[in-house]
Amino acid sequence: MRPRLFVWAGVFALTGVGAVLTYSASRGQGPTDPPKMLPAEVLAPTPIGPAAKGVVPAAATAPSARKAAPFDRFRNYDELPELTREIVFANLRGTEWLSRSGIHQANGRFIPGLNPALGKATEDDHFMRQALGAFALARAARLTGEEKYVVAASQTILSLLAETPKDPANPAARKPVQPAAVCNPVGAAAYLALAIFEMPDPVPQMTQYGEELCEFIRGHLQTDGTVQFTEAGVPADPDGVNLYPGPALAALAMSQRSVPAAWKKEALARGLAYYRKHFQSSPHPAFVPWMTVAFAEAHLQTKDAACAEFVFEMCDWLRKLQYENPDRQRAYWRGGFPAVADGKVVQTAPTIDTAYYALGLADACRMIRQMSRADAARYDQYQATLTRALQFVITLQYGEENTQHFAGHFRPAVVGAFHASHTDGNLRIDHTAVAVAALSEYLIAGADR
């Protein structure tokens, strides 16, 4: 624990000033002068995979002084089943890409994305995408025990905290300063809190920042169990109910694990009652992932059967949407999920959104494995659905074999990242982040078993 405290102290000292400078030079959506061209300092990724036998990736090096990590049981690559090895390597490649110099910048921010066709960094920065990148690195640190992921995640978190100052109306809370029309404030606070509470062994000061974000969320909780995610004068997002209450409740559930409070428990209970009925009347795949995270965690803390039942209802419905045996022309759809519009399933090509569904299914598997009376039949169903989903997600990852058409000097900039779909090769930081988070949770949950 002592070395970890020194790491945190260094991060606070070095990143605090950078975060303030970032804030003072921003208008709510990151640096005002994002890189126009691909940064020259992007480094080639460490060779990872069967073709790199004899080379041990940095993320797989286990110093004897480091405490045990969930990843330890996957370090003997040659002894792993082929599918597990494929998931392990995909996870390591994606995590290394997120943490690579030039992708994760000196100011703590990730470049928003890359347009491989033009060889340029994109400028579509967004607070929540940055926070999801920090969440993914924090989870990777929890999986591997690697301090470099702790440092990178904390740098991003501190940079984003500079854009969530204390709320003058409520000094106990931190309020995002981005205009609500540009970035949903409840979503922004929730994603940043999720990143903080996913960090392994956070120092008290960082935990306090997370609690202040939860206090902001608390101010948007209604007595009927709903999360008020709209702001006065801002047009309501028609998909908002599927996008923001889930992360908000998941943040409260994760903070309850670290800092228990009666109001959080009550908020989750009221949210369960309301949103369970909402899902039964208006199911939507985008609603499922973070609600599953929230109530899988709530069940593990409280053993409340209703929380587990809600998770089962959502995942039972979701898994039936998965493409299992598409026709020959659409064979690459296998494992992905269709879209849902106006309550109807639309048979469209799957995208990186499948990684979000895998994120929820992985937490459902984790919940079942830790239940006193595990539902083995459901676990087998969810595990199979999750595995197929991740196999599809991996087909969206850039590797050495599918980047030969890029110039040699540019190829390292994309290897390891996940693109949007089989018809869209552009990169966005949140796409790789959610894929890494889902792959990491699969391994943490023991879903390979």
Image (spheres, rainbow, N blue to C red):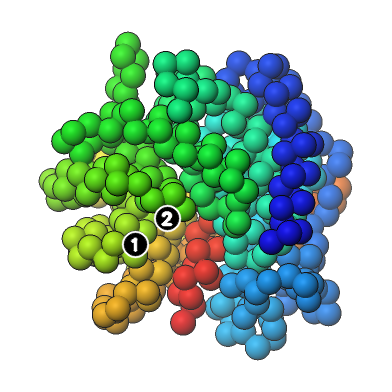
Q: Horizontal placement of 140 versus 299: left or right?
A: right
- Residue type at numbered disc 1: Gln
Q: Which element type, helix, strand or loop, lies under badge 1? A: helix
Q: Is residue 335 above or below residue 55?
A: above
Q: List x then y, in percent, for residue 152.
A: 71, 47
Q: Horizontal placement of 95 versus 412: left or right?
A: left
Q: Quadrant of residue 46?
A: bottom right
Q: List x then y, in percent, for residue 224.
A: 16, 36
Which residue occupies 58% across, 85% down? 81
As measured in the structure, the alpha-carbon distance from the residue carrying label 2 to the one carrying label 1 is 7 Å
Give the residue number, with chain letter if any, for mark 1.
301
Which residue occupies 77% across, 51% down? 6
- Residue type at numbered disc 2: Arg
Asked if the residues shown at circle 2 and circle 1 are in contact, with their CB atoms under 8 angstroms apart, the answer is: yes
Assess disc 1: are there few (<14), some (14-19) or many (≥20) residues with their C-alpha within 10 Å of its C-alpha: some
Q: Return the disc, 2 or 1, that comes first in the chain's sequence.
A: 2
Which residue occupies 26% across, 80% down? 373
Q: Quadrant of residue 18?
A: top right
Q: Horizontal placement of 226 versus 253: left or right?
A: left
Q: Is residue 284 visible?
A: no
* Quarter the N terminus occupies: bottom right
Q: List x then y, in percent, for residue 358.
A: 43, 60
Q: Which element type, helix, strand or loop, lies under badge 2? A: helix
Q: Is residue 406 above or below residue 177?
A: below
Which sits in the foreground, 282 or 295?
A: 295
